[in-house]
């Protein structure tokens, strides 16, 4: 049974007065506790798909079922309630959050907005969230701009899991981090998936990261799915021209070069 099923998704923009397809007839599914990665060159439609899935923008065509509900038909209170189950982690949490807000304020918002905890309970819940992502509870009173990039991304993950989602969309969520910090964040995501059975839509240009964390991968080209399959199998032996080009352009994956 699919947790998320996207069918014939389409989104067009206009460039120099002419329409062009940013996303063109895209379909895919994600099961419970599964990671589907979206890979492709810049402009292939990865981030547009993420924003369509989250309804940060509206599609021109297509259907999306999330937890058995027609997600695109929801509005008002029904949409707000369902959003608690579908969260996102952005590439740059410093841009996504008010940098002068405290960590406590950032984590308080979803607990308050979705009525997850009372005012009296929220400090304890915030401390537990910080500890869950490997941060000291004392960090709660620090401002977002005062903490490191790795710490900010852990706070972003804590905020995402605060509503107990079944699916998190991660849009290049580790690409701006140092290699050592990136590995720690990936381990945290895998641990959360094992413990909480969270599914991920994982958007990345890094095939090495995708091979480490994803169950399946969809390779995108010009807004369309060029191929999809088991992540390691596709990366080891891509069948599409764009898949072959992506592997060839990634030195650590190109075994045939000296």
Image (tube, grey):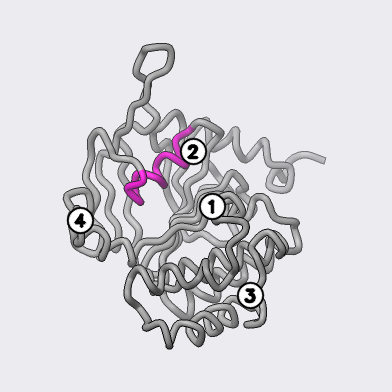
* Distance of label 2 from label 4 (alpha carbons): 43 Å
Left or right: 256 as drawn, with respect to 71: right
**Circle 1 residue:** 96
The quadrant of the image that shows the N terminus is bottom left
Q: Residue at x 68, y 63 (%)?
A: 150
Q: The C terminus lies in which quarter of the figure?
A: top right
Q: Which residue is mark 4?
A: 76
Q: Nearer the viewer, mark 3 or mark 1?
A: 3
Q: Nearer the viewer, residue 217 or 233?
A: 217
CB under 8 Å between callouts 3 and 1? no
Report the residue that reaches farthest toward the top: 17
Q: Is residue 36 depicted above or below 111 in this figure?
A: above
Q: Residue at x 59, y 76 (%)?
A: 133
Residue 26 lies in the magenta stretch: no
Q: N-terminal of the two: label 4 or label 1?
A: 4
Q: Residues within 10 Å of mark 1 (few under 14, many from 20)?
A: few
Among the 4 quarters of the image, the one containing residue 35: bottom left
Task: Residue 90 in the image: state x and y as whole percent.
Answer: 53, 53
Gap in angstroms between the C-alphas marked 4 and 3: 33 Å
What is the span of residues highlighted in magenta in the rendered image? 44-56
Marks 4, 3: nearer the viewer: 3
Which of marks 4 and 2 precedes in the sequence? Answer: 4
């Amino acid at each position: 049974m699919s947790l998320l099923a996207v069918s014939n998704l389409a989104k067009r923009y206009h460039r120099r007065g002419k329409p062009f397809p940013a996303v063109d007839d895209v379909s895919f599914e994600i099961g419970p506790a599964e990671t589907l990665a979206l890979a492709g060159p810049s402009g292939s439609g990865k981030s547009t798909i993420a924003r369509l899935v989250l309804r940060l923008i509206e599609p021109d065509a297509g259907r999306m079922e999330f937890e058995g509900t027609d997600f695109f038909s929801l509005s008002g209170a029904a949409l707000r309630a369902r959003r608690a189950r579908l969260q996102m982690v952005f590439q740059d949490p410093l841009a996504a959050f008010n940098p002068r807000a405290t960590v406590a304020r950032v984590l308080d918002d979803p607990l308050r907005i979705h009525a997850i905890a009372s005012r009296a309970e929220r400090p304890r819940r915030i401390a537990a969230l910080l500890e869950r992502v490997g941060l000291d509870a004392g960090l709660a009173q620090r401002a977002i701009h005062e903490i490191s990039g790795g710490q900010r991304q852990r706070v972003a993950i804590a905020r995402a899991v605060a509503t107990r989602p079944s699916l998190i969309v991660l849009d290049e969520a580790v690409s701006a981090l140092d290699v050592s910090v990136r590995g720690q964040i990936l381990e945290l995501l895998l641990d959360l998936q094992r413990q909480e059975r969270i599914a991920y839509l994982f958007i990345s240009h890094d095939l090495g990261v995708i091979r480490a964390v994803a169950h399946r991968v969809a390779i995108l080209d010009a807004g369309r799915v060029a191929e999809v399959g088991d992540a390691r199998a596709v990366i080891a032996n891509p069948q599409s021209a764009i898949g072959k080009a992506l592997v060839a352009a990634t030195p650590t994956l190109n075994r045939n070069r000296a």
